[in-house]
Image: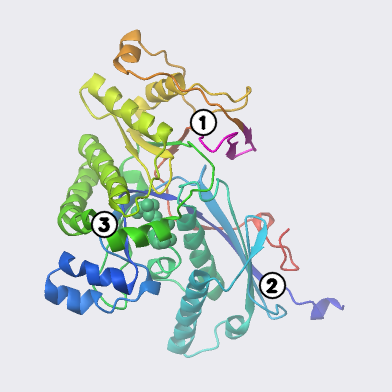
Amino acid sequence: MPMDTVVKPAIVTCTAPVNIAVVKYCKCHMYPCIVSLADMLPFNTFQRHWGKRNEDLILPINSSLSVTLDQDQLKTTTTVASCRSFQEDRIWLNGKEEDINHPRLQSCLREIRRLARKRRNDLDCSVDMGCLSHKVHICSVNNFPTAAGLASSAAGFACLVYTLAQVYGVDGELSGIARQGSGSACRSMYGGFVQWIMGEREDGKDSVAQQVEPESHWPDLRVLVLVASAERKPVGSTSGMQTSVETSSLLKHRAKSVVPDRMKQMIEAVHKRDFATFAELTMRDSNQFHATCLDTYPPIFYLNTVSRQVISLVHQYNRHYGEARVAYTFDAGPNAVIYTLQQHVAEFFHVVRHFFPPDNNGKKFLTGIQVEPVSISEELKNAICLEPMPKGISYIISTKTAWFQSKQCEVISVFPCVLKAGPGPHVLEDPSQHLLGADGLPK
Ligand code: DP6
């Protein structure tokens, strides 16, 4: 083909971060659940705002707050190519072509294209006239195990929406579109400390994320991810939440009577960098979220033996020092996310190592920020009444990502990686980082 007739795709690559909620979200899912939600809200509010809320919009029953994690260790990278020679929209996730017709993918594509069309009409010009009629190829990879409770859908949909927005040249409030891919994805559209305001409108237009403080606000806050299992979680958070909303009265009590005050207290703790309050609220919220899972009928179990050991360890460690130095939180999986301050990272890391001795065949146990060697006092060891739990598993570590394979379903290994709060999505300028080649196919 002569050079001038070669059709080259427009290609953009972006990365987006994972976020970990310290006040968890739960959503309003189906009509039957809305009937049971009626007693959650004042009657007129329910009539006005909930009666007709559309389940596809992914609207929460309470506001939530999260910390966006640094992308050095945990991120999604997405390339979108747009070209007039493409026959259809296509998507590859973590090396495998997936069905582009998934309703959540379609929602994001539709909404971004709608915004782009609106922008073009508003500008009354032919900006990227062709681009909107072109099909897109999307290729996305995570550098961490998918579906292991590490909010891969949050980083994934945030990255998709952000990258599509670059391709179509749209900007402005995009978190409401990311939310329609995965609820928690709206919070990954911002860095630092982010709240997702539940909103009241039937069309969900006011259910958006907002930055509470940037990542620079609390520079000594650290995060350790203790990966207890890379197994696929038995209950995806979507189906789990749906059952919870339908059957758990504790969940309604939580949304109506607990979360509104907790959000205010958490935002104040973040503003003041008050770690003790932040830690207690975080642990209480995680415990209540998992209590609502147990209150679901039939119940849902996300925590396993290691998760419970980590919970005990944290409480005993804090009790030993007479203050909250570390806090745990668990999403829809057994991995513990630990929040702490820089000055406690090294000791707590070595405590974890002592009580969960690694069986890593000399391979790297820790990735991320380096931790200096610290010896743990006998007094501290004795204060923590736990039997050490060595891993009965084999695992593989690739260059940047640790993958664990358990010999049995009953897991476990503990893989901590030290992280900081980080910024929101951004564009990668280096073309060598594109995941799609000039032919529009994965490299
Ligand atoms: C337990 O955002 O994964 O992590 O909206 O159905 O995609 P969908 O669910 P998802 O839910 C995660 C919920 C949580 C708590 C939280 O992050 O707030």
Q: Which residue is depicted at the point 28% across and 78% down?
A: 202
CB atoms of marks 2 and 3 within 8 Å = no
Span of residues in magenta: 395-411
Where's residue 26, x and y in %? Answer: 31, 59
In this rendering, the answer to whether 48 lies above or below 41 is below
- Secondary structure under badge 1? loop
Q: Ligand 1 quadrant?
A: bottom left
CB atoms of marks 1 and 3 within 8 Å = no
Q: Which disc, if any, is residue 9?
A: 2
In this rendering, the answer to whether 360 lies above or below 368 is above
Of the residues shown, which amino acid type is indicated by label 2? Pro
Closer to the N terminus: mark 1 or mark 3? Answer: 3
In this rendering, the answer to whether 248 lies above or below 364 is below
Where's residue 157, x and y in %? Answer: 49, 62
Residue identifier under label 3: 248
Distance between mark 2 and mark 3 Cα atoms = 50 Å
Q: Which disc, if any, is residue 413?
A: 1
Closer to the N terminus: mark 2 or mark 1? Answer: 2
Where's residue 251, x and y in %? Answer: 24, 56
Is label 1 or label 3 in front? Answer: 3
Q: Which residue is depicted at the point 20% across and 22% down?
A: 322
Is residue 426 found left or right of 217 in the rendered image?
right
- Secondary structure under badge 2? loop
- Secondary structure under badge 3? loop
